[in-house]
Image: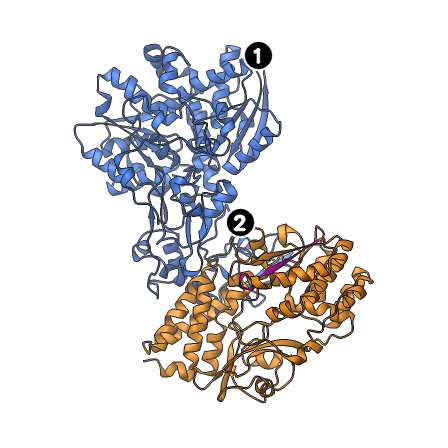
Amino acid sequence: MGKEKSSSLEKSLLFKSNLEGLKKALALKPGQVIRKVKKSGLCGRGGAGFPTGLKWEISAKASGEHFVLCNADEGEPGTFKDKLIISKAPLNIIEGIIIACHAVKAREAFIYLRGEYSHLKPKLQGAIRKARPFLERKGIKVTIVLGEGAYICGEETAILNSIEGRRPEPRRKPPYPAVKGLRGQPTVVNNVETLSVIPLIFLERFNPKKRLCSFSGDLKKPGVFEVVEGKKLGELVEMAKPIGVPRAVSFGASGGIIPYDPVMELTEENIKERGAWLGSCSIIVLNHTHSIVEFCESVQHFFVHESCGYCAACREGNLRILEILKRISNSDATMRDLRNLEKLCEFVSLASFCSLGRAAPNHVITGLRHFKEEFVRRCR
Amino acid sequence: MQITIDGKKISFTKGETILEIARRNGIEIPTLCFHPMLEPEGRCRVCLVEANARIVTSCDTRAAEGMIINTKTKRLLRLRREAVNLIASSVPPQTLKEDNELTRAMKKVGLRKPTYLHHVVQEKDHSSKAVWRRTDSCILCGRCTQLCSEKQSVDAIAFANRSGETVIVGVEEEPLASTKCVSCGQCVLACPTNALTEAGEIRQVERILENKEKIKVVQVAPSVRVSLGECFGLEPGAILTGQVVAALKKTGFDYVFDTNFSADMTIMEEATELVERIKNKKTPMFTSCCPAWIDFCCEFYPKLVSKLSTTKSPQQVMGAMIKTYFAKKRGIKPKSIVSVSIMPCTAKKREASLSGINASRGRDIDLVLTTRELAELLKKKRINPTALKPADFDSPLGESTGAGTIFGSTGGVMEAALRTAYFLTEGHNLRNSDLMMARGSKGIREFSLKTKKLNLKGAVAHGLGNARKLIERMIAGEHFDFVEVMACPGGCVGGGGQPKPTDWQKINARAKAIYRIDRGKKKRASHENEEVKKAYFEFLGEPCSKKAERILHRHYPVNGKKPSEKRSLQDFKAPKLH
């Protein structure tokens, strides 16, 4: 999806720490490392946005054999920032992993790499080789596990099941993986981007407002850009050179869709206000040639295909949402269908077992909120 | 610690779930996938409540101090109805016409008809002689896989595929008969719809009953008489011994025999075998009454097969006696007898079809009905056993002692065998026949019995998961002389063919009834059974004689596979899955 390069990146978030950050972090005691990460204000970049330092602290306090797990199963449609990080700055990830292991006193770490990214495995292996002296000094074993292509494996507890060789289904939370994760032991699960900026914290080069954003859709220059939270959406989209006039932006598949507002400042609060969710920070730009109904239908196809089947809400609910969307898109639906659609979305978003299921109808909910007339127009 | 449910302050102990607390206080929350004997998995999303204004499932959410819980807001009622609606939409309309847990849940949430159309493709698996499976009425509650894997440690069925194509299949998508399935039927007992059923034989029985040329003989297992009443509105544990006999006579059977009789006979053989093995230091000996346990042992522990008692199960002992002793006595050709058995069990269906188990030329047991099937048959024929005048079992295979009766409960075979083994070694009966140490509902129970001539360490396990634990301990070096294993929780009273739904309360009530029958009997040890004595005198000689060996004993495969079935032409035509 698109080209992923930007010359300015090399100087900023993808700044290569070249083991310097790691050295500085290892000079500190685990407690100090955790305190520093907490103070940095770093929140998870995978979507949920949980404070990373807090997660480490909780895990470090839990007793047992600790594990660190890097979630590189980047499966959200329209998100491809982790791919860029793995190919450009794999060493940063390994540094982050070693620092995390140091902080929670883990001796074993896993990288769960998306199956479609198998060509990037050598990059990670190369980075592991480079960091070998440190790995050996700390007695840490890093294993790369290849995913088999299920969206649900991006969910932190489903990964655990997948690594253990079980059916990839989410587990009940609590207990959270930080306390009871892989093989029932405390496990820190962090996203690729989160781990890759860890060394920057120790080089005093980290800015929590800066993050990588994947741009795709009706753009001449789609790709990964570094954005600072609080910038105007219009300015950001301009960087990627829109084709035609943008009319809506969707935050990945599960973040929801909102009308394009060039003066809106890109902050979590502003997006939340509109019923959507920034998530893993991916922006899909839609121009006037696209119908929101059809966009929702295609996103829904994705969720129906990827539902793991564990709970009835996500399995059956998403299927029925798709049925109705298909009917609406074929101008075959009635107003009753529309009411049923609203009921279904409410149910799936409130009653699903895992966070992926709960986020699945976001695009329909926000679509109905901001573009209802488009749905109504196609109903009898 | 306290929480507030619907404005009422309620105290609770740590670790309790919201559902448990609510039910304890008479607050009704509808559930569907929840099963009292299993850890909640939260798959169906019906039992929603609001906890501190958040929507959660009550079955798997543990209460926390000060939680404020609502169970009856408008939003909750709407969401619950939607959950049941979606699940009901996924099954074919005929499933919604039956009385099952799904239709009961529909009534509870006030849903008359599902909104959406049924979408699942039907796939049938009739490969197994005991359990039939169909995918279309499955609501994917996961009880069956959870039971099979966690409780029974068999892992014969599992989830496959995802999204709308999610199904439960035999592992590696094999037909059930080719998996390690031991036919215990616990999955059937837990199934909230009719996706898993026993291999139905009602129609064959009905056809046989209309056949005037055949002599129709039926036997009733000990635990059927204490559970059948539940299907006719009686409390669990109601004893219907005479009524069952009367009902079966009314259905058209010529002779009604008591499996308790053959249980007594089984004990004569098994106790003799036990005493023999102890003398020759060839212990441990495992009981062999439970066909699911036999399959389990053959599949998972082929090295222990030589430790299984070679005595047939009471069903097969009765079958053999009917087609040899009874036929000879009455001067009937064995071929003209149709032998039916009423069992609390699905595995008995497979056992009856095994190839190496028959004493006569054809099958010793022709047809097997579960307790549930019997209830269905009686209802079809509009016979209500509770309204009938009790009748007696027929001679010569109808007398029974208390020892035969307690076969229906976990620990019963052990107790019955010890009553006779004690007599065989000491020469007189136990002063107190109640061997309390064998009873109870703990998963694994162990004890020792020391008398002048008998020094015996025994163990009882019920539920195959417990059996596996016990065996692993024995492999690690622990020694027992005599081990009883029942595949189902609680023994046959919790069998896979018993009325649905079954939970621990019902199992315990049925077991209590069994022991009540035992206590009411004058004769409580198998060797006191006059008809059994007569059968040995007239026909078999003595226990474990050559003739008894031929008729009442069997062999087991040692190749790590469960015993094979007798193949009929029909089997070759059976449609294969995929």
Residue at the location (30% across, 18% down)?
B396
Q: Which mark is residue B39?
A: 2
Residue at disc 2, secondary structure: loop
Whether residue B430 is visible: no
Label 1 Cα neighbours within 10 Å, binned few <14 / some 14-19 / many ≥20: few
Q: Say which element carries label 1.
A: loop
Image coords of residue A118 (percent x, y):
56, 61
Q: Is residue A347 visible?
A: yes
Query: As displayed, is residue A10 above or below residue B70?
Result: below
Question: Could you say which disc has been placed on residue B453 in the image?
Answer: 1
Q: In the picture provided, is B128 more to the left or to the right than B249?
A: right
Residue B268 image point, x, y percent: 43, 17
Three-letter amino acid code of the residue under disc 1: Lys
Cα distance, mark 1 to mark 2? Answer: 46 Å
Marks counted in the figure total 2
Residues rendered magenta in the picture: A108-117
Q: Amino acid at mark 2?
A: Glu
The colour applied to the residues of chain A in this rendering is: orange
